[in-house]
Amino acid sequence: MYTQQDEQRLYEQAKQLLKTQPDSPEEHIAQLREVINYADWKYYVQSDPALADVEYDTLFKQLNHTEDKYPELVTAYSPTQRVAQGLSERFPTVSHLVPMLSLDNTYNAEDLTDWDRKCRELAETEELEYCVEPKYDGASISLIYDNGSLARGATRGDGVMGEDVTANIRQIKAIPLSAALVKQGVTQVEIRGEIVIHKNVFEAYNKQRIAEGLSPLANPRNAASGTLRILDPAEVKKRGLNAILYHISDYTLADGAERPKQLGTHYGSLRWLYDLGFPTPAKEMKVFKHIDDVIAYCHEFEEQRDSLAFEVDGLVIKVNDFAMQDKMGMTSHHPRWAVAYKFKARQATSKLLDVEFQVGRVGAITPVAKIEPVPIGGVTVKSVSLFNEDVIREKDLRIGDTVLVERAGDVIPYIVKPLAELRTGEEKEIIFPTHCPACNSELEKQQDEAAWRCINIVCPVQVVERMIHFASKDAMDIRSLGGANVQKLYEKGLLPDIAGIYNIDWNKVKELGGFGEKSVTNLQEAIELSKKQPLNRLIYALGIRHVGETTAKTLASAVANINEFYDWDVEKLATLEDIGPKVATSVVDFFAREQNRETIRKLGEAGVNLENEHRGEQMTSGELSGKTFLFTGTLSHFKRSDAEAMVEAKGGSILGGVSSKLNYLVVGEDAGSKLEKAKKLGTVNILTEQEFLTLIEQ
Ligand code: IVH
């Protein structure tokens, strides 16, 4: 559709329009339409944005503004007269009952104050109430319920027609398949919302992808929208998507039925849905009467964006009263009664200075981009993993390129793409090494794999990395045995391998210097504690290729003792849920190796738990469904928000106080009145942090 020259020209034209505008309105409008159409095509059809959001919005505003001034120049084909396009051909297309519009964006207090002024003008009142809620960063969706049953789920598509993804939507447990709407007099309703992915679920999924040698997905948004369009609903089910519903776009009442009272305001409508079992931001919504309070809340909320379970890229401010909303109406692009306040961007451009090659614990060589340090979301990014050679080739990265870097929340930074249009011709090809940078053995690559590997099992970097992984938080959780200590003890010959962790000569460690009395005691205690870790952690800690935390749990629950795996073959392993031939072969290879058997024997002799006390029990994603939790006191093992997210990810819910409805109270240090009250009630299970972790993990 566009040639490379077109693309280069339009990119330059966009940059130019941001700086200076042509005097003639005809020329100005023509240029803007051309670049906006191009940017829409890049964004919606190519899924490869050409402009930053702020730049796009600025150009769109220029066009709106100029067309407002010269209405005779408006044509039906202007980008202001429609929502942007882009449909996949894989799902049947369906029309939305009401067009799915976008939102207008604001970035600062001034924009919001302007918007507030316009709202009051349009509504012809000074008494407006605003409802503020998070702007979820996922894939937008429309749901139709007919006579109380989920009848259709569709993607946004071009805003008028979407893709029918009902079969996939039905796999999302947060979305009720039926609800008591008819009792409320409502025969049909269309609800809008966002399909999102829990940050924890997203990270676990990416860990799994990395363990399988695949490159991780850039952010939860891509993961959500990609998953929604997978053609196999069973695969969608496994991915643990979630949903938040934030708008009733249409409803029909039964003959003679009275409109439910709550359907007079946005706040009321989302509470109403929530009470009927729909996932809405009922608890996150806030209502304000003054824009200054809205602005203060926006600033306060932005500070906490990382503590939320889902990725949020801003807040949405909506006029609360539906009658006012109707009065204000909409443009063909967005409703006038709502606006998004966008948080600071988490993308930035930088220069690719060099690529280093690191050796991982299973020998995979990972290229790591060294970039000119650049702040993104409060963190200075200077190193970005490139995962494997294929990623470099697919993105056509070159040393010296200007690159677009993204860091979404706590997610690891990621190179989105090089800005090829900015190349000078001086950029250099990235040459992948043929030999291990640590031990110089020749690298190998298996046919179906993306990674080059060093297969020297005693390659010093791999030995150290294996120990670091073994001791890490999600594995055996040996506090204070981090990378620096492992490296130091290994170099001094005091820690030759994994089994050696339980056989350290502490006198020699003390002689070394750098380890005080207290740190030695801490290390000894942490090592001792790790002996009691459940079997799934040990299996994960052993660092078997392709075995992530989830697979380790599946494996652990299939045996009473790890030694049983010595007799298992690929066929038997493949009978376990979610274990395919690749993982099965890797597990068989691992347990067949004499060196690994020796390690396991030594671990057992040292007193490390090799047994599974909870054989046959397996935690599924909805295992805590119907269970309620509350956290109190100072938690030292995890952040409260993380723990709450873990509960929710497994289907449980968090209560605000102690009552007869509470099932579990998790107590940290200095727990006060809540603990007292729970004890008095006598019906609440009181858990320590460790007990809570065990409950969640098993
Ligand atoms: S209201 C007419 N509320 O943001 C109703 N949208 O950038 C318009 N979004 O297309 C949408 N969180 O996909 C609304 N709380 C929220 C939202 C939200 C995320 C998405 C939605 C919209 C996009 C615009």
Image (cartoon, rainbow, N blue to C red):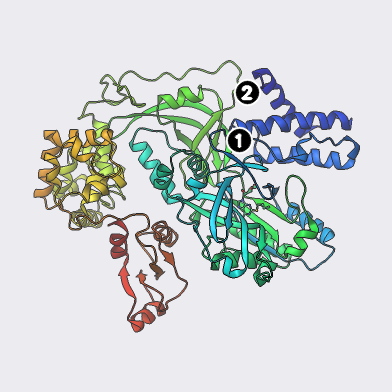
- Distance from the alpha carbon under mark 2 to that under mark 1: 30 Å
Percent of width and height locating residue 693 = 31, 60
Q: Residue at x 18, y 40 (%)?
A: 572
Q: Quadrant of residue 496?
A: top left
Residue tagged 2: 422
Percent of width and height locating residue 126 = 82, 67
Quadrant where the C terminus sits is bottom left
Percent of width and height locating residue 175 = 50, 56
Give the secondary structure at mark 2.
Answer: helix
Q: Furthest residue to the bottom?
A: 680
Mark 2 vs mark 1, foreground winner is 1
Residue tagged 1: 87
Q: In which quarter of the image is residue 627?
A: bottom left
The image shows residue 228, relative to residue 428, as above or below, that is: below
Q: Can residue 68 be seen in this view?
A: yes
Give the secondary structure at mark 1.
Answer: loop
